[in-house]
Amino acid sequence: MERKKRRYSGQSFTDRKNERRARLVRAALEVTGRSGLEGASVAAICVAAGLTARYFYESYPSREAIFVDAYRMAQEELLGHIEKAHGGRPSVKGALTGFFSALRANPGLARVFLVDLDDHGPDMKAASQEGAAKLARAFALKATHPLTVAGVVGAVVDIAKRWIESEFAEPVDNVVEIALPFIRMK
C-alpha cells in the first residue's frame, strides 16, 4: 500500500520536490560559474542550495546529471539577454552585441555555457548541440548546410571563449566587429 504524500506549508510533495530541484540547478549554475566544473562538488552545490545530499540524490543520479540542467539554464538566460538586446528587432549586429554583452555581464554564465561544460558526455553533447542551434537562430544565420552552420557558430563561440579567457580585454564593440564577418558568411 502506497503512502499518500502529505502537504507541508501548503505545498504538495511534487511542488516541494520541484522547488528543491530548481534550487539545486540554480546552485549548480552559481557554484560552477564561480569555481569551475572541478570545484562544483555535490557538497558545494548542496551548501549553496541550502539542502542536504539526500535531496540532491532525490533529483539527480550524479553530479554530471545536474550539469546538463545547469548548462541549459545558462543557455536560456544568455539567449534571453540576446533577445532583450535587440528588442525584438532581429539584426545580426544586435544579436552579437547582445551575446557578447551578456557574456561580459555574466561571467559565471559564460563560463558554464562556453568553457567548462561543453561536450562532457552524451547528454551534455546533446545539450551543447541544442545550444548551438539556438545561437544560430538568434544570430539569424543565412547558411543552411549543417556543416556551415556548425562552422559559423563554432567560430563565434571560439572567439567568445578566447575573449573570456582574456578576461574581456577587448571592448564589446570590437569583439562584435571581429565576429561579424563570420556570421555574414554564406
Image (tube, helix red, strand yellow):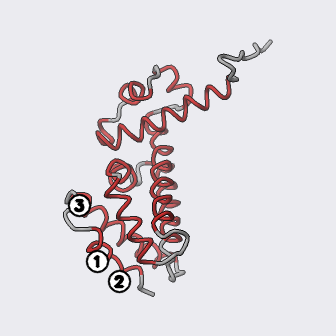
**Vertical relation: 102 (above or below) 67:** below
Question: Marks 3 and 1, how far apart in space?
Answer: 14 Å
Q: What residue is at 34 percent from the left and 47 percent from the top?
A: 108
Circle 1 sits in a helix, a strand or a loop, which is it?
Answer: helix
Depth order, front residue of 150/27: 27
Q: Which residue, given by chain and number where applicable, does mark 3 sit on?
A: 168
Mark 3 and mark 2 in contact (Cβ < 8 Å)? no
Q: Residue 181 is drawn in which quadrant?
A: bottom left
Q: Would you name the residue on which mark 1 appears? A: 178
Q: Residue at x 51, y 26 (%)?
A: 57
Q: Where is residue 185 drawn, in percent x and y?
A: 41, 85
Q: Which amino acid type is marked by label 2?
A: Pro
Can you say which quadrant of the picture contains the N terminus?
Answer: top right
Mark 3 neighbour density, 10 Å: few (under 14) some (14–19) many (20 or more): some
Cα separation, mark 2 vs mark 3, equals 20 Å
Q: Which residue is mark 2?
A: 181
Mark 1 in CB contact with mark 2 (< 8 angstroms) = yes
The circle on residue 113 is none
Q: In the rendered structure, which disc, 3 or 1, sits on the residue that comes first in sequence?
A: 3
> Which quadrant holds the C terminus?
bottom left
- Image-based side of 166 in relation to 21, left or right: left
| Position of residue 15 measured from the top left corner of the image (x, y, whole percent) | 66, 29
State the image coordinates of residue 127 (x, y, percent, origin top left).
51, 54
User: Tag 1: Cα neighbours inside 10 Å, few (<14), some, or many (≥20)?
Assistant: few
What amino acid type is highlighted by mark number 1?
Ile
